[in-house]
Every structure is written in structure tokens, then in C-alpha cells.
């Protein structure tokens, strides 16, 4: 971040011990993960700040973001939520970078477990012990595209995505279009996977789970479209940026934060929130895509993709550094 000569960057491994230590020189504490509220208070000559990786919506604003002297939002959607609660949000979103790992030589994707066990729960700890036996006994096929239109989910299967709710509406629509395939790359807790299975029951024959994968670049390039979850609990949607960088267009609800990262008709398509129209607009779009199989190439939209490049991220950080230097003198 080019903080200047004499700046020392110190990783904090024990917030409770290290943050309460008196410091003779000005310090800037930058937080990615939640820490106790009493440790966040900015003291004279020091600045405590945080990245807002999640929107305020549905959270206690004070517990989530109180006590920070400055908060850096990852999208304008997150920023507006911070401002609505009187929180000290930075003047522009930092967004993110499509920093994809190297694609494997053959691009082969093997099916893995779809579970990410939560070790805080006794049930999950027990199932985590039993799962390796089950995994040894079941087949692990390699991914191959099936005939038809291929939609993909490339995401952790977490509650903020609201996949079970979305597919409780969309699964019957998918079932009416049997040549549409849904490929799910990601893992989640037992309850998340169970609820998603239940929601997808009407179109179960069109759905395959592939588990958590590292070579996401190879995945995106084998999809016709990336499909997002529901919007309001999302902060940004890094998978949207990644998919577009790989040339894969996106299907998403017409709402922020997705409206910040997709160019409609050029890098993806929007559809109305299925909770408002029972999925009618999604089905209209699906029928259009089935009848018109040629797809757009987001990689041609260099100006749009440039907003999410590393160079653009560096430019957004320059005024941050100037602000910090001004505050700390």
C-alpha cells in the first residue's frame, strides 16, 4: 500500500493481548475479521478501521461495526447500509479483484464432498468422522458437460446466498425445462445442503453437486452461465467478477450489489426477484436462452472488467493511504 519509509506492518495474532498494549508511535489497525467491541475503540494517536465484507442488513450495526474510526466497504450496497446507520464509511467502495489461481493443465474436475463441517456443532463433528468412510465407498466421477444449457453455481453454500429459498421457487420452473442442467460447485454445512436438496427435489435429475473445488477458472469456462443467489445479504459477489473475467456471463436478480458488477446484455442478464413474481421473469429469460443458445463474451468488455483489476484496486487505495497519513500525522 506504499505507506512510506519507516512504516512497520505487524500481523496481529492475539487481539486481546496486542491491541491493549500502549504504543509510542501512531498506529493504524486494519481488521478483516470481527473482534470484541471493547478492542475496537480508537485511542488518541491511533486509528482502528475495518473492512466491511458483509452488509449491515440483518445485523446489529453496533455489534458488527461499532467502535471503528473508519470502515472500508466492498461495494456501494454495503456503503449505503453503513451510512444509513451513521457509521463512518469510506467515500467509495473498494470492490475486489478477479485473482484466479492457475488453471490446471487438463482442466479435469473430480467430484468431492459437498459438506463443509461446522466443528462447533456436535452433529457435524460426528458426521465429519464418519464421512471419510462414505467417501471411500462412493464413486467420484469427473465433470463432463451434459447436452443442453448449463447453469452453474460456484459458491460456498452458506445462508447468506439464500439458495434454498430461491430454488423453492425456481426448481419447479427448471423441471419444466429438462434440457437445462444445474451444476453446483461448492460445499456447505449439513443444514444448508439438506435444505438445498429439499428445495431442488422437483428438478433433482438435472442437478449435480461437485463439492468444493480449487480450479474455479476451469469450472467457469465450462458453464454457459453463472447463476447467483438472492441479493440483499450479499456484499459483492466475487464469483461474479471471476466468471466475467473468464468469459462466462452471469444470471442474477436485478438488484444491488449485482447491479454494480454486471453490465446487462453485455456481461450477463438480470431477472426480477422470484419472490415478487413467482419466477415468471426467470422462466421468460430461460426460454429465451434456450431458443437463442449463442452467448455473450464478457471478456470483450474491457472497460467494465478493468474496474476489478489489480491496477484499479491500487488506484482506489491511494486516497486511503493519504487519508491515513493525514489522520495519524
Image: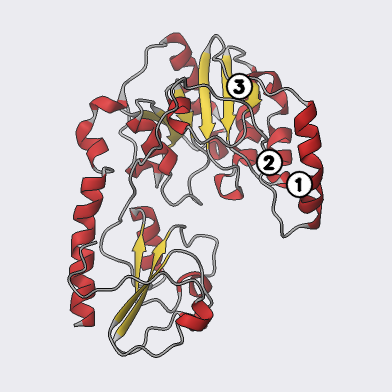
Image quadrant containing the C terminus? bottom left
Mark 1 or mark 3, which is nearer the start of the sequence?
1
Residue at 53% over, 81% down? 16
Q: What color scheme is it?
A: secondary structure
- Give the image quarter of residue 136: top right
- Per the model, the C-alpha gap separating discs 2 and 3 is 24 Å
Tell me where residue 169 appears, x and y as whole percent. 62, 33
Q: Is residue 315 left or right of residue 192?
A: left
Mark 2 or mark 1, which is nearer the start of the sequence?
2
Q: Give the tally of numbered discs.
A: 3
- Per the model, the C-alpha gap separating discs 1 and 2 is 9 Å
Residue at 41% over, 43% down? 238
Q: Disc 1 on helix, strand or loop?
A: helix
Disc sitting over residue 174 in the figure: 3
Residue at 48% over, 49% down? 234
Q: Disc 2 on helix, strand or loop?
A: loop
Image quadrant containing the N terminus? bottom left
Disc sitting over residue 128 in the figure: 1
Residue at 77% over, 25% down? 138
Amino acid at each position: 500500500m506504499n505507506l512510506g519509509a519507516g512504516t512497520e506492518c505487524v500481523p496481529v495474532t492475539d487481539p486481546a493481548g496486542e491491541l491493549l498494549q500502549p504504543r509510542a508511535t501512531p498506529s493504524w489497525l486494519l481488521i478483516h475479521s470481527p473482534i470484541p467491541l471493547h478492542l475496537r475503540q480508537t485511542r488518541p494517536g491511533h486509528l482502528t478501521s475495518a473492512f466491511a465484507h458483509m452488509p449491515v442488513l440483518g445485523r446489529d450495526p453496533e455489534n458488527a461495526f461499532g467502535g471503528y474510526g473508519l470502515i472500508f466497504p466492498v461495494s456501494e450496497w454495503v456503503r449505503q447500509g453503513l451510512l444509513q446507520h451513521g457509521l463512518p464509511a469510506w467515500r467509495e467502495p473498494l470492490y475486489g479483484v478477479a485473482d484466479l489461481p492457475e488453471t490446471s493443465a487438463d482442466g479435469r474436475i473430480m467430484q468431492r464432498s459437498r459438506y463443509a463441517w461446522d466443528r462447533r456443532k456436535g452433529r457435524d463433528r460426528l458426521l465429519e468422522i464418519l464421512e471419510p468412510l462414505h467417501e471411500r465407498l462412493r464413486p467420484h466421477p469427473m465433470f463432463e458437460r451434459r447436452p443442453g444449457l448449463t447453469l452453474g453455481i460456484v459458491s460456498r453454500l452458506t445462508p447468506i446466498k439464500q439458495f434454498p429459498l430461491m430454488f423453492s421457487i425456481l426448481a419447479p420452473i427448471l423441471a419444466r425445462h429438462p434440457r437445462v442442467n444445474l451444476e453446483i460447485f461448492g460445499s456447505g454445512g449439513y443444514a444448508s445442503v439438506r435444505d438445498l436438496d429439499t428445495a431442488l427435489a422437483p428438478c433433482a435429475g438435472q442437478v449435480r453437486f461437485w463439492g468444493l473445488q480449487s480450479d474455479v477458472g476451469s469450472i467457469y469456462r465450462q458453464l454457459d452461465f453463472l447463476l447467483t443467489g438472492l441479493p440483499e445479504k450479499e456484499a459483492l459477489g466475487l464469483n461474479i467478477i471471476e466468471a466475467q473475467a473468464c468469459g462466462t456471463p452471469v444470471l442474477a436478480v436485478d438488484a444491488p450489489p449485482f447491479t454494480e458488477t454486471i453490465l446487462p446484455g453485455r456481461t450477463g442478464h438480470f431477472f426480477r426477484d422470484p419472490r415478487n413474481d413467482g419466477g415468471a421473469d426467470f422462466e421468460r429469460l430461460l426460454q429465451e436462452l434456450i431458443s437463442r443458445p449463442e452467448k455473450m463474451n464478457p471478456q470483450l468488455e474491457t472497460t467494465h472488467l478493468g474496474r476489478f483489476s489489480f491496477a484499479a484496486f491500487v488506484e482506489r487505495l491511494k486516497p486511503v493511504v493519504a487519508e491515513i497519513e493525514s489522520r495519524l500525522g
